[in-house]
Image (spheres, grey):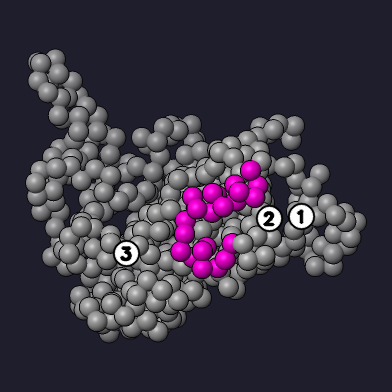
Amino acid sequence: MDPTVRLIKSESRAKWAPFRFGQHPDFEKDYRRCYRQARRKFRKGQFCDALLGREIHLRELTDPRHPDVFIIPRNRHLYVVDEWGDAIGFERRTFPFSSTDFYVDLDRPGLFHEFGRSAAFSRLGQINQLGYLVPPRPDEWDGSMHVAYLIPQFYSTRWDHSLLVAIIMEITLARNDFSKEKRIPVVLTAGCHDIATPAGGDSIKRVDPKNLDEEENFSWLLEYHNLAERWAKQFGFNLALAQSWVKGEGLFGRLLDVIDKISYTAIDCYHLGLIRAGKARKLCLGHPLIMDVWQSIRFSPDQNNFAFTQPEQLFWFLLLRAYEYQEFLFNPYCRALDLFLNKLVKPLYKAGIITKEQLLTHGDDWLNWELNKYYPEEIKAIIEPEEFSFERFETAEEQREFCVKLGERVERTENITGFTTGLDWSVFSQEGIVPLRRVISQEEIELLEGVADSTKGYYVYYRL
């Protein structure tokens, strides 16, 4: 039987309200209990503070293994307060489709204070995680509709993503008995792995892929802000080693790559699912705690390797990530405005009007302001994409022939080689640590590889 049949039989039973989507399946029951209690108090003329949830102090959520990170259970309606009795509010880091949210005090001296005071890290809050991407085309769209989009469509930032990566890295290493001294450089690297993302995100990176790549510019930006030298003195930070981790090299580099993918998949699929139905949304509804996969990461006794303890859970996560690429990240329709932004920036970048240094040290608002000087009619709060279409071909030769036929109507060509499926990620089994593909069914392997293959091809984007 196709594994996707095992999702949920009817999506209609799960309401579209944000109250349910992405939430812990037990949260609603606890929330309704608090709501009923609040109504009873209200009838008696009492302040209905129960509606806020059961008050819980941060000290009750302290874990001595990672004292800087507080884990907040998502199965209960809790009102979390700090040492002064004030609600932590928006400082709570939400992790959708999981059992846990998190809190770190960015003002408190220590490791995470670095993320609170660093201008280089704060800049990530000015860069949208999904840039100019738009939701997949509605099923009912017949091609005659004119669609306009408020930019940006998705409001999560690289700062949200990066802080979540640092938090999960800290907890994972602490739970696996790594000392604080050994954890600190890795967590700093995890939090700053995207620090050199250019303003405008991935669409702008494609203007000059090599020179604007965040991994290639990681060291340059840390030195630009004098962070590498300061962290070396304060935390024993090794820039060359951190650079290798950002590139996915070594034990901690591989772990960073895994946690990075878990973080962005959770955030992206949450925002996508709020707006549009599809395979990713259905999978999240069928597996509401799919992101608990991070909690199954365990290191070997010698701490020289790590693997997942729940192979089936890992498969569902990788399938969700595959669906995200198939119907969103590599969906040509979703990238209509992404290509539009790239087209505007490229000539200004080549002419030196917009420079690499500016893109790596400023945010999206600055970029939009600069573009508005040269394209006042194109840069607006609401943008309607030009009428465009695309074709996908199996070979480069077919792509070239089609381009010759269209002539000047061609906007861009691209060769999408797919994405890594994760089937080589390690899991624990009776045989020891083995690749995931060794312990799941052939049917599941073919499903995951089939989704990846469906995105590959030679694409031509052109004006109608």
Q: Residue 311 at what x, y percent from top left?
A: 41, 65
Residue shown at the point (63%, 43%) measured from the top left: 376
Mark 2 residue element: helix
User: Which region shows up in magenta?
Assistant: 354-376
Q: Is residue 398 left or right of residue 438?
A: right
Tell me: 321 left or right of 459.
Answer: left
The residue type indicated by label 3 comes to Ser
Regarding mark 3 in the picture, which secondary structure is present there? loop
Give whichever of 177, 157 is nearer the camera.
157
Q: Residue at x 41, y 58 (%)?
A: 124
Q: Give the class, few, some or many, for how many residues have Cα within 10 Å of label 1's Cα (few <14, many ≥20).
A: some
Question: Upstream in the sequence, badge 1 or badge 3?
Answer: 3
> In front of the other: label 1 or label 3?
3
Q: Secondary structure at mark 1?
A: strand
Q: Which residue is mark 3?
A: 118
Q: Which disc is residue 411 wearing?
A: 1
Q: Is residue 175 left or right of residue 376?
A: left
Report the magenta stretch's main SS.
helix
Classify mark 2: residues with Cα within 10 Å, few (<14), some (14-19) or many (20+). some
Q: Is residue 236 above or below residue 426?
A: below
Q: Was residue 384 drawn as part of the magenta stretch in this picture?
A: no
- Residue highlighted by disc 2: 343
Q: Is residue 232 visible?
A: yes
Q: Is 374 colored magenta in this rendering?
A: yes
x and y percent of residue 446 in the render? Answer: 60, 63
Does residue 327 lie above or below 305 as drawn? above
Q: Does 196 appear above or below 60?
A: below
Residue shown at the point (31%, 67%) measured from the top left: 169
Contact (CB < 8 A) between labels 1 and 2?
yes
Residue 445: image x %, image y %?
A: 56, 64
- Label 1 amino acid? Glu
